[in-house]
Amino acid sequence: MSLPLQERHLLCTLQMWRQRDSVQSGNDYRKLAERNLAKKKEDQSHIDRSQGKLTLAELCDRYLKTVQHQRPKTIERKTFIVQENQE
């Protein structure tokens, strides 16, 4: 089935707009990715390297303190996983 000329023209125009928008979106995503990468690098420059000497047990204890606001069942599961990994 063939579309009338006016509808084909509209479809072609719509496709061109979509292609143009996708190219612009791609550029926007690249710029956003570059900004996010720069921010991540900036954040990493502020990392306290002295904390690198933590043991796994100490790190797990710190982690469990950060999940105490969650539901009891969630805390229970996460505590179980931490205990399994510490053994």
Image: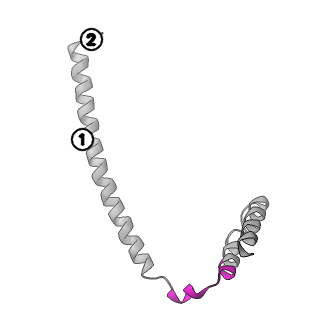
Q: Left of 28 or right of it: where is 45?
A: right
Residue 53, quarter of the rendered image: bottom right
Whether the residues at callouts 2 and 1 have beta carbons within 8 Å, the answer is no
What kind of element bears circle 2?
Answer: loop
**Picture quarter with the N terminus:** top left
Tell me residue 40's x, y (percent): 42, 71
Nearer to us in this view, 62 or 39: 62
Q: Which residues are magenta?
A: 48-59
- State the separation of the CA atoms marked 2 and 1: 26 Å
Q: Which mark is residue 2?
A: 2
N-term-proximal mark, 2 vs 1: 2
Nearer to us in this view, 21 or 52: 52
Q: Left of 24 or right of it: where is 37?
A: right
Residue 86, quarter of the rendered image: bottom right
Tell me residue 84's x, y (percent): 75, 69
Q: Left of 54 or right of it: where is 38?
A: left
For badge 1, the amino acid type reads: Arg
The image shows residue 68, relative to residue 25, as above or below, that is: below
Tell me residue 35's x, y (percent): 34, 65
Q: Which mark is residue 72?
A: none
For badge 2, the amino acid type reads: Ser
Q: Which residue is mark 1?
A: 20
Q: Residue drawn at (23%, 34%), measured in percent from left and top?
A: 16
Crowding near pointer 1: few (<14 within 10 Å), some, many (20+)?
few
